[in-house]
Image (cartoon, rainbow, N blue to C red):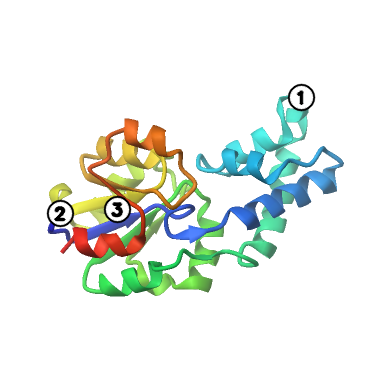
């Protein structure tokens, strides 16, 4: 087992199953604007690089003049619906409780406004620190938010691990100088994640309890 003092988690696709509420809010936005709706699978493929990219891709290159309006409309719909279906993945609550004696943090490309509301509804007490994509530290795979968490909590790089479901997580963690555990149950592309050479790859949250002490 690998000794750690800090577990840093990605949010969407790692801690929470949120894709249904995201897709619903996107299509409510597109429908309100009179733009063509997207399939759920299309929208799922847009998730992971922050809300700005999500909306830019959702409205489409041909409608980018509506992008700023879409951002504003989406904000309202998503805040209203971000906890309709969103839940911790099975096993997450038990795993977080298991690591009650460890520092735990969230580093997500999601805006802090949405992140705070979702975690408040599901269990923000588990986390010592949360950094969102609009906190000014850059988006993963940039290492800024991860480095900031390490500094804020005073944990050395060799005593921390990042857990995530995307190449952004793996590359961001490695650029920050820490080890990374990829998860196979989220929204990330497995082949692309394996190509980024995470230090570990797990299929269920429960496996984290056997990896870290």
Query: Earlier along the polypeptide chain: callout 3 or callout 1?
Result: 1
Q: Secondary structure at mark 1?
A: helix
Residue beneath disc 2: 159
Query: Residue 212 or 174: which is nearer the viewer?
Result: 212
Query: Earlier along the polypeptide chain: callout 3 or callout 2?
Result: 3
Residue beneath disc 3: 149
Q: Secondary structure at mark 2?
A: helix
Q: Residue at x 36, y 59 (%)?
A: 204
From the viewer's perspective, is 203 left or right of 89?
A: left
Query: Earlier along the polypeptide chain: callout 1 or callout 2?
Result: 1
Residue beneath disc 1: 62
> Can residue 141 be seen in the rendering of this structure?
no
From the viewer's perspective, is 12 left or right of 70?
A: left
The alpha-carbon separation of the residues under discs 3 and 1 comes to: 39 Å
Indicate which label's residue lies in the foreground, 3 or 2.
2
> Can residue 24 be seen in the rendering of this structure?
yes
Residue 193 appears at what percent x and percent y?
37, 37
Task: Mark 3 and mark 2 in contact? Answer it, CB < 8 Å.
Answer: no
Indicate which label's residue lies in the foreground, 3 or 1.
1
The alpha-carbon separation of the residues under discs 1 and 2 comes to: 47 Å
Quadrant of the drawing holding the C terminus: bottom left
Name the quadrant containing residue 114. Answer: bottom right
Query: Residue 73 or 180: which is nearer the viewer?
Result: 180
Query: Residue 180 or 125: which is nearer the viewer?
Result: 180
From the viewer's perspective, is 144 left or right of 28?
A: left
Q: Residues within 10 Å of mark 2 (few under 14, many from 20)?
A: some
Residue 123 appears at what percent x and percent y?
44, 73
């Amino acid at each position: 087992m690998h000794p750690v003092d800090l577990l840093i988690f990605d949010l969407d696709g790692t801690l929470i199953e949120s894709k249904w509420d995201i897709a619903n809010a996107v299509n409510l936005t597109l429908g309100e604007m009179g733009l063509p709706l997207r399939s759920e699978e299309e929208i799922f493929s847009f998730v992971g690089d922050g809300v700005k990219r999500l909306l830019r891709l959702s409205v489409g290159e041909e409608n980018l003049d509506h992008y700023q309006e879409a951002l504003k409309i989406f904000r309202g719909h998503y805040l209203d619906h971000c906890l309709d279906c969103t839940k911790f993945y099975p096993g997450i609550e038990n795993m977080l409780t298991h690591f009650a004696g460890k520092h735990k943090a969230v580093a997500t490309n999601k805006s802090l406004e949405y992140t705070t509301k979702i975690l408040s509804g599901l269990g923000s007490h588990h986390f010592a620190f949360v950094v969102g994509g609009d906190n000014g530290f850059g988006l993963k795979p940039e290492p800024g938010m991860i480095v900031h968490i390490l500094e804020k909590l005073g944990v050395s790089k060799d005593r921390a691990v990042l857990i995530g479901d995307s190449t952004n997580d793996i590359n961001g963690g490695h650029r920050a100088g820490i080890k990374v555990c990829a998860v196979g149950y989220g929204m990330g592309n497995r082949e692309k994640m394996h190509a980024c050479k995470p230090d570990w790859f797990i299929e269920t949250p429960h496996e984290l309890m056997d990896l870290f002490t």
